[in-house]
Amino acid sequence: MALWPFKRQTEQKAHPAGGALMIGGGPSWSRKDKAQSYITEGYQLNVIVYRAVNEIVRAAASIQIELYNGDEAIEQHPVLDLLANPHPGATYQSWLAEMLINRMLMGEMAASADNPRQPAEIWPLLPLNIGIVPGPSGIPRQYIYEINNRKTTFDVDQITGQSDMLFVKTYNPGDYWRGQSPLMAAAIAGDTHNAGMRWNYSLLKNSARPSGLIRFKGGYPSGEMVARMREYFKAKMQGAENAGEIPMLADDAEWQSLSQTARDMDFSNTMRETAKYVAAALGVPLPLIDNDASTFNNLEQAKERLYTDTVIPIMREVLAALNNWLLPRYGDGLELRLDLDTIPALEALRERMFNRAVTAYREGLLTLQEARVLMGYEPEAEGEFKPTVGGGMFDLPADDIKALAYGLDHG
């Protein structure tokens, strides 16, 4: 594969640990057994993880993306066309969903372009199939994508760190080269929730009846009789279709049910607690997962927190990666940004910022110019019409107020 086409002549930088990071010198592959368990047990078979991940994905896909050249918004550009149709059969929403699901399950997301310059297609890649060849300066030497016994190698520029593959990972203190799955912290809670669901399902299959014992009068029965009794109870007593069946036994046998307490059979508290831990690990407020824990008020607050605490930071991570990997192919000065004013769930937050600026001006704590800047306006020129505060002349916050409102780095 060709090296990054926009290589700049710059001083080579290296990790201070240098070659100490090159354990064994061979490719670093993700633990496929563990990664597969996150996919299967964590996402495909756990309703809480599935719901939480998809809450994040849907919320992220609902945010509109804007392209800027400096402070000027660009309405039409090949980058916007590419993101709208990343590859045949895909939309921006489906492309982003695949990237984010990989990131939430494996702590990594990756994509490749169809050519090293201005691409016509960008394809998401499954991190499970990516190997990393360590480099001596702390930058990967190569990425190796292997699927169906076919390997594709992506070289990495040892000066700029750029490659034809986009690879983004979360910080992993246990492995310098690989990302850490957010599900690692929720693994025990997720396994407990899965075990509880399987146990409740097994009770349902047995009509939610606890096990019992057969008391024989006289001596211990023969092995043949024990085997026949086991087969009888499996056929006549187990399964939802046998609900309410009454065992018919011989004169010398008596069925005695073993009762269980409500505590033994009630998994509600345990299931709720494990759901809370899983949701917390993924950054999704519990009212968005558990309908019993939601009211109208806290549901609105939960949606706001989902965006401000989880979705917006993750989306800024995605856009920062695209700004660094994709946009330099189209020239300098281009930047993808989030249009946070398009998020209905943040309407209450915008209103609070609006009222704060109005109150501060009325109380004399801010000048009109300072209030305008706080609300996202440019300072007005001398002699320009000055609207009265509270007269409906102020609009919702724009880019500058976004940075103040969400405590995020606007640059």
Image: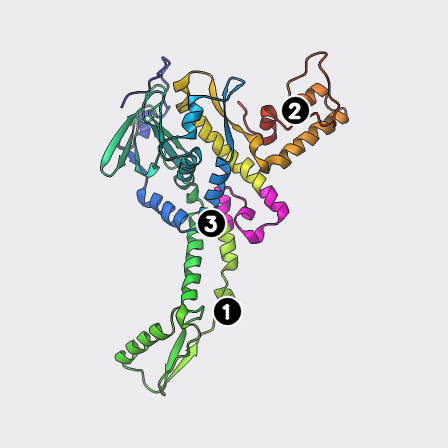
Query: What's the CA distance linking mark 3 and mark 2?
Result: 40 Å
Q: Which residues are magenta?
A: 276-302
Residue 126 belongs to magenta span: no
- Compared to residue 133, the image places residue 158 above or below, namely above
Q: Residues within 10 Å of mark 3 (few under 14, many from 20)?
A: many
Disc 2 or 1, which lies upstream in sequence?
1
Name the residue at 35% across, 28% down: 121
**Circle number at residue 374:** 2
Please state which of the two labelled residues, at mark 2 or mark 1, is closer to the viewer: 2
Name the residue at 46% across, 28% down: 319
**Residue 325, how many percent across, how many down?**
39, 24
Q: Are the residues tagged 2 and 1 within 8 Å (C-beta)? A: no
**Residue 315, how many percent across, how many down?**
48, 32
Mark yes or no: residue 323 visible: no
Q: Residues within 10 Å of mark 2 (few under 14, many from 20)?
A: many
Q: Which residue is mark 3?
A: 48
Q: Is residue 46 left or right of residue 142?
A: right
